[in-house]
């Protein structure tokens, strides 16, 4: 009898530990089927937005289910549910939260960053959007475009529960496409959405519960979760900054974000990640041995660095990268600062007497001339709105932001005529 009571007690304790959440979450991977969504930097060749967000959505579903959530998903394959079907599925099942997953694109490949769209700020939806945005920035580390209101997006307008639509990164940007075109990048996107939802719901969703959910142990390279791999042989963490070697490693203004970093040995070990917004890279749970760090990023020469790990302490290996010689004609280090518009250097201005500060059209990138509305916005429209939405169908989810260089968050209205229309929800832009 005592044994039976003990077994009942143990079973009850286990049931409590594995208790299911009361929340039902609807995940909506955007696009699908004949609608590829945003195309990547490589054009129509796959993968495109629909492929990436399906992968992220399935990983997010597995992660949430691993933490006891009830989850439904609007598509689990390469199909296209209509926009009304997506909101109807969430509404008819009584979902508590709706998370639509997207990626961005724009005609100018300089557009970059991460943003979250909501139907209205304030209230529960606004809080969900803020938490998701914060988690994406914390995990993926790219430029923060903020939380923005979209009242015309079908899946935000027609769902009856708090909802958000995430625009993870720009597939039209080479660095951000390269990041997303890795298993680690997609897993980081999914994990950040999970973390944002859990923070919003005040649920305990520690990373330990994600082991095996996504099938991708490279998650630790981006999230810093040391419990995911379960590798008993690990002894160290490899960490450092990528920076312009014309400056000191301690000069925070010249660290390099978005550099692809590979850590590999002579055998089968290989981990990949990208430096975050501060130039930081971090590989967790690395076994002892000899490795090569390989760095690549646009505007700099590729670099290999040999390292050896033989201790349990953090191994700091901040690494300087040399600017590509093709950029040497510009003497003012524009690869990192973009300051040449104000220097009056003849290599850049053609002896125009520093026209960037006079308002002459010789250098519209830093002026307010109408020839470059994507970077300025002084004369395109007198509207005060931050965004302009363009529809390619009655239920279309497309919207466009015309904004500045990414160094501030000043959005200005645009006519929308120069922006290529893309189908379905959420391909919103633009910070250059």
Image: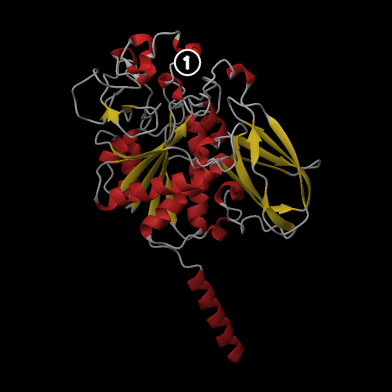
Percent x, y for residue 94? 32, 53
Percent x, y for residue 156? 29, 40
Tell me the residue at 28%/44% (across/down). Answer: 159
Q: Quadrant of residue 70?
A: bottom left
Q: Which residue is mark 1?
A: 345
Q: Residues within 10 Å of mark 1 (few under 14, many from 20)?
A: some
Label total for image: 1
In the image, residue 369 above or below residue 425: above
Please state, as top left, top right, bottom left or bottom right, where the N terminus lies in the image. bottom right
Percent x, y for residue 390? 29, 24
In the image, residue 204 above or below residue 12: above
- The answer to whether any part of residue 165 appears in the image is yes
Tell me the residue at 45%/39% (across/down). Answer: 75
Percent x, y for residue 48? 51, 28
- The answer to whether any part of residue 217 appears in the image is no
Please state, as top left, top right, bottom left or bottom right, where the C terminus lies in the image. top left
């Amino acid at each position: 009898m005592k044994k039976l009571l003990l077994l009942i007690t143990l079973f009850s304790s286990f049931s409590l530990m594995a208790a299911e959440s009361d929340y039902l979450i609807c995940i909506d991977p955007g696009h699908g089927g004949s609608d590829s969504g945003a195309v990547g930097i490589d054009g129509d060749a796959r993968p495109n937005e629909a492929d990436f967000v399906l992968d992220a959505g399935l990983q997010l579903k597995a992660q949430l289910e691993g933490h006891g959530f009830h989850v439904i998903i609007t598509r689990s394959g390469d199909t296209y549910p209509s926009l009304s079907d997506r909101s109807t599925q969430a509404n008819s099942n009584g979902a508590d939260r709706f998370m639509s997953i997207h990626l961005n694109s724009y005609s100018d490949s300089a557009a970059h960053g991460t943003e979250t769209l909501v139907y209205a700020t304030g209230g529960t939806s606004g809080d969900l959007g803020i938490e998701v945005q914060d988690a994406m920035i914390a995990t993926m580390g790219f430029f923060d475009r903020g939380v923005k209101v979209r009242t015309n997006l079908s899946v935000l307008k027609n769902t009856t529960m708090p909802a958000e639509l995430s625009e993870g990164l720009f597939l039209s940007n080479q660095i951000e496409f390269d990041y997303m075109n890795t298993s680690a990048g997609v897993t980081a996107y999914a994990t950040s959405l999970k973390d944002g939802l859990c923070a919003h719901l005040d649920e305990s969703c520690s990373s330990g519960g994600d082991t095996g959910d996504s099938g991708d142990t490279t998650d630790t390279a981006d999230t810093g979760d040391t419990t995911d791999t379960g590798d008993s042989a690990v002894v160290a963490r490899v960490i450092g900054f990528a920076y312009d070697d014309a400056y000191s490693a301690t000069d925070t203004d010249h660290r390099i974000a978005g550099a692809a970093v590979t850590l590999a040995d002579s055998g089968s070990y290989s981990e990949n990640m990208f430096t975050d917004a501060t130039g930081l890279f971090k590989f967790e749970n690395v076994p002892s041995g000899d490795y090569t760090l390989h760095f690549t990023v646009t505007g700099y020469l590729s670099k290999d660095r040999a390292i050896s790990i033989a201790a349990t302490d953090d191994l700091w290996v901040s690494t300087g990268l040399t600017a590509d010689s093709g950029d040497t004609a510009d003497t003012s280090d524009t690869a990192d600062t973009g300051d040449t518009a104000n220097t009056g250097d003849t290599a850049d201005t053609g002896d125009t007497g520093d026209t960037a500060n006079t308002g002459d059209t010789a250098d519209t990138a830093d002026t307010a001339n109408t020839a470059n509305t994507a970077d300025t916005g002084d004369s395109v429209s007198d509207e005060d709105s931050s965004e302009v939405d363009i529809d390619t169908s009655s239920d279309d989810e497309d919207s466009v932001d015309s904004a500045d260089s990414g160094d501030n968050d000043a959005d200005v209205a645009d006519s929308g005529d120069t922006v290529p229309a893309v189908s379905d929800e959420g391909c919103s832009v633009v910070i250059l």
